[in-house]
Image (spheres, rainbow, N blue to C red):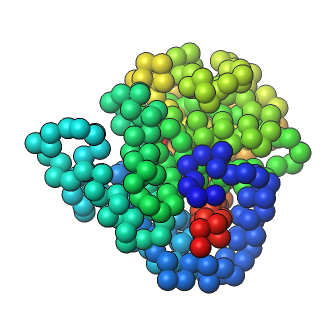
Amino acid sequence: MRHFTTVDDIADLKKALDVAFDVKKHPFAYGHLGRNKTMVLIFFNSSLRTRLSTQKAALNLGMNTMVLNVNDDGWQLETEMGVVMDGSKPEHLREAVPVIGSYCDIIGVRSFARFQSREEDYGEKILNQFIEYAGVPVVSMEAATRHPLQSFADLMTIEELKTRERPRVVLTWAPHPRALPQAVANSFVEWMRRADYDLVVTHPAGYELAPEFMQDLRVEYDQEKAFKDADFIYAKNWASYSSYGQILSKDMNWTVDARKMAMTRNARFMHCLPVRRNMIVTDEVIDSPASVVIHEAANREWSAMAVLKMILENNP
Ligand code: AN0
Ligand code: CP
């Protein structure tokens, strides 16, 4: 593996999980791998978990880390090719990326969907410029269409907590006051499919995910039906893909509550965080023993460490 941007960069998912559980057990056994190496973490958007867990993972591997919040600390970066740069942005990614690459051995990038154009977001313009011009391995820390470090941690969490071989995993849309990317949901579908779980997706009409992610997966539009027999309820809001970036519903009937959780097979509640309480999920559910959101967030350190370890081993 050189770059990590999707589950497709993982050749053997079972082996990758073994690596993740191994580093979770032995966090400080591989400090030699990153000796005298540096990872730069670039953020175009806010982050709590990704920033801290990825930095911690790099430190566990003996790497030095440098963090740049582009919007607060650096020059504002132009991302469009061929433009006359007479606006507010003094530097182009075309120079910034190879310069950053010259200072480090691995780059982590967080670049959300901007919702200006579906083609631009789904073309992963920013992430692809990093891959093309960095000259070093690039790790997605959530790009416009995917959040693979999150899904990897989600997969670890389900593997640790499942009570049957092929658990029923339900991805449910839930209401949110702002337009959020489809990245977490897209990735979750992609990783759960590779894990061959019994995956059910439920959301209101108009929130269908991109066909390349859904493929032959059927949507259950009745949330209560979807919850029946579920082992895991994975809640997430996303804005519409077809009416790109729009909020079509804030229907609080889709909030995950105790009445709906009671319809499941004693399911665990999952969410990538940050979560809006009493919009996505009620206090009662997120504060109940069924909620595994902290366990799930803690696994972010190990999914990041597994990915960085594999990259260091493959790119000495
Ligand atoms: C982001 C999202 O939905 O993609 C990050 C989640 C990891 N969430 C928010 O911006 C609230
Ligand atoms: N789940 C997640 O990626 O959180 P942050 O946006 O805080 O990094």
**Of 141 and 224, the residue lying toward us:** 141
Q: Quadrant of the N terminus?
A: bottom right
User: Can you name the residue that lies furthest to the left here?
Assistant: 86
**Of 133 and 65, the residue lying toward us:** 133
Is any atom of residue 262 visible in this view?
no
Q: Tell whether 64 sits left or right of 271.
A: left
16 relative to 232, above or below:
below
Q: Quadrant of residue 294?
A: bottom right
User: Residue 176 location in percent, x, y?
Assistant: 45, 33
265 relative to 293, above or below:
above
**Measuring 47% from the left and 70% from the top, which residue is drawn there?**
105
Q: Quadrant of the C terminus?
A: bottom right
Q: Quadrant of residue 209?
A: top right
Count how many numbered circles sit on residues in the image.
0
Q: Tell whether 94 sits left or right of 52.
A: left
User: Can you name the residue that lies furthest to the top here?
Assistant: 205
Is any atom of residue 3 visible in this view?
yes
User: Residue 83 location in percent, x, y?
Assistant: 20, 38
**Measuring 28% from the left and 39% from the top, which residue is drawn there?**
80
User: Residue 296 location in percent, x, y?
Assistant: 64, 55
**Of 194 and 135, the residue lying toward us:** 135
User: Can you name the residue that lies furthest to the right here?
Assistant: 165
**Measuring 45% from the left and 34% from the top, which residue is drawn there?**
123
38 relative to 269, above or below:
below
Q: Quadrant of residue 172?
A: top right
